[in-house]
Amino acid sequence: MEMRKYPDREKHLSLPLTSEFDLAARKVKRERRFGLLKEELIRLFFLANGVLAILVLIGIFALLLLNTIPAFKEISIKEFFTGRTWDPTSPEKPEYGILSLIVSSAMVTVGALVIAVPIGLGVAAYLSDVAHWRVREIVKPIIEILAGIPSVVVGFLGIVLFGPIISRLFHVSSGLTALNGSFLLAIMALPTIISISEDSLKAVPLSYTEASLALGASRWQTLIRVKFPAALSGIIAAIMLGMGRAIGETMTVLMATGNARSFPHGYLDSIRTLTADIAIELGEVPYYTTHYYALFAIGFVLFLITFVVNLIADIMLNKYQQREL
Amino acid sequence: MRTDRVNQKMVQRAFSREDNLALFPSYGLLVSRKEKMGQRKSSEHIFFIDRILNKNSKKGVRKMKLFSKNLLSIILVSFLAFVGFITFTSGVLEAQRGKMIQIKGSDTMVNLLQILAEEYMNRYPGTAIAVLGGGSGTGIAALTNGTCDIASTSREWRQREIDQAWERGVRPRFFVIAIDGLSIIVNEKNPIEKLTMLQVGAMYRGEIRNWRDVGGPNLPIVLYGRQSNSGTYVFMQEHVLGNKNYSPDMREMNGNAQIVEAVIQDEGGIGYVGVGYIYDDKGQIRKGLKVLNIARDEKSSAFSPLDKAAVDNGNYPIARPLYLATNGKPNPAVAGFLSFIIGPEGQKIVEREGFYPISTKHREQNEKNLK
């Protein structure tokens, strides 16, 4: 009706609209294309980072393996793994037996777990089930700060605090023992164990708890018989990660356990772990000698142990995360 | 009134949309859009949707761009900074090589050298001296590998080590800077006052295991020693243990100070440390510590490492020179520091720190090596 009077109005009015639309569309298209390119580049960048991490791991593995092989030209594998004496700088006859080192590492790790697991799980249960949320919000970060204490500081505590206490408590003259190392490693493994097992306890679906309580179970029964089994894989993963930390720890055990080479007979003996031995001797070892290669062989053994422990932890953790999803 | 009303209506009717349009073109635009909304609903909606999309996508893109630009520039800048830092530091290191002195090695000497370095830097600004411990073996390895300017060792270099250095093109020159009375320490509560070299050796070989066997209380002996990278460890092994193995029960500590701490807390403990480590800040012997007198053999009398005369004339059996080693003729900066140490000022500091000054014979040898 209106068009009668202004026949070209439509054209006049629609022109800017169309062109604006077109321009915008073109611009969007262009930007999208450019954006895609950028996205691709960024994707590649992150891919490269991921690949780099894997390459580093493979590189370390290869380096250890390459330097380990020459060691066994002069040391028999049997002597290496079953020999009880490690004395490569001996003026009489160098000996390369790492059994006592392996036993020492195992002892101190098991000792640390025996101390840390009950305490860690207790704290985790308290934080996830008993504590008021405000208490949890304060306590959990504090526990996680504990993980950040440098191992040198912990080792120093072992020398000046725990060592003397142990020597007085058990009537041994020196406190620099496997027990001392176990205590300190337990302290260092606690944050990992508490934090991860608390997470996995909290991840147990609320319906489990509700069902259990509805069936008449007490809170204690619910915690022990329902929540712990449900969170078991996460808790095992936490323990394994704590264990990995304890095996690999160097400075603390180096400072606090006395590093005697003799075969340990108990927790009140001084011990020398795999890690401490490498740390002590790698600094002064003449390069490309049997001793040098033997240290790499120890490193390789250590790598395998921590690799297996971490792998198990990872598998466990994965299992538990899958269930949550 | 009536006519007025009619007129008003008429006027209203007269000014229809068209008239409005004619009168005010802008009104037309408005109306036309409204009209278009009615007429071309679908296309109009598309327009609005697209406008929204456009707006949002524009915003999104801009955000993205900003983000990726930032990200890229952060990466780029950090990379450049890294490269720049590397070149800068290497350049600085290159430029400072003459003035920056790296000393590495003996843990027994690290405190003494630190103090000497501080005094020297105070008196002659412009030279930077870094002193690192790690053990004599570490120092020898570092000089051989060319990663330090001076290696400090509390023992003589072995022939094998000198050969290895020569193979790598390093020509070590040695300077005796102080004499150390290697001190055998026990807990204050231990009634033992003196031991012979043989007894100490037998203890550290693990042959004597109880203080009863040397006339002390019935208490197992706990051995404290250093680690195999230590010059003191090697010196003890060569001069006291008769080149035999240490007892595997010896606790291998990280340094002199740790041995002192351990022996103070251990009634049955025995340890060996450089004489400079048995004093506290005030120059007194550390509380809870006892320094044993050592006799060469059963017939000779025992001397204390605190007895300057006994150390000087060689009556104290386990006195030892402390060495610095350079690669070939020391460069001017290193030579300046060395002549400060072996000069009267340096030797005064050596004495203040509990060690003993060098003899004239050593001084002459040092001066020969400086040239």
Image (spheres, helix red, strand yellow):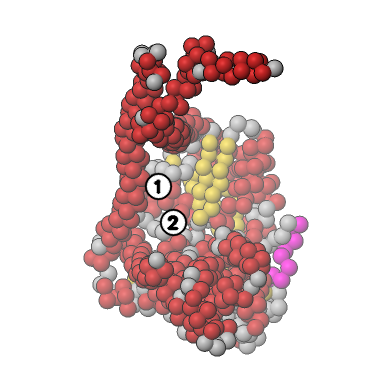
Q: Is residue B160 left or right of residue A182?
A: left
Residue type at numbered disc 1: Thr
Residue B19 shows up from this direction: yes
If the image is split into quadrants, where does the N terminus of chain A sit? Answer: top left
A217 above or below B331? below
- Residue B227 vs B4, above or below: the answer is below
* Mark 1 neighbour density, 10 Å: few (under 14) some (14–19) many (20 or more): many
For the record, the magenta segment spans B282-292
In the rendered view of the protein, which quadrant contains the C terminus of chain A? bottom left
Residue B282: image tag: none
In the displayed structure, does residue A70 sit left or right of residue A180? Answer: left
Q: Position of residue B156 (x, y in %)?
A: 47, 55
Q: Nearer the viewer, residue A318 or B304?
A: A318
Residue B144 — which label?
Answer: 1
- The reply to whether the C-beta atoms of the residues labelled 1 and 2 are less than 8 Å apart is no
What residue is shown at x 40% (from left), y 47% (from top)? Answer: B144
Front in this rendered view, residue B355 or A41? A41
Q: Position of residue B275 (x, y in %)?
A: 63, 60
On the image, which quarter does residue A18 sit in?
A: top left
Q: Residue at x 51, y 18 (%)?
A: B16
Q: Does the magenta-highlighted stretch encompass residue B76?
A: no
Q: What is the three-letter code of the residue carrying label 2? A: Gly
Mark carried by residue A283: 2
State the predominant SS element of the stretch in magenta.
loop
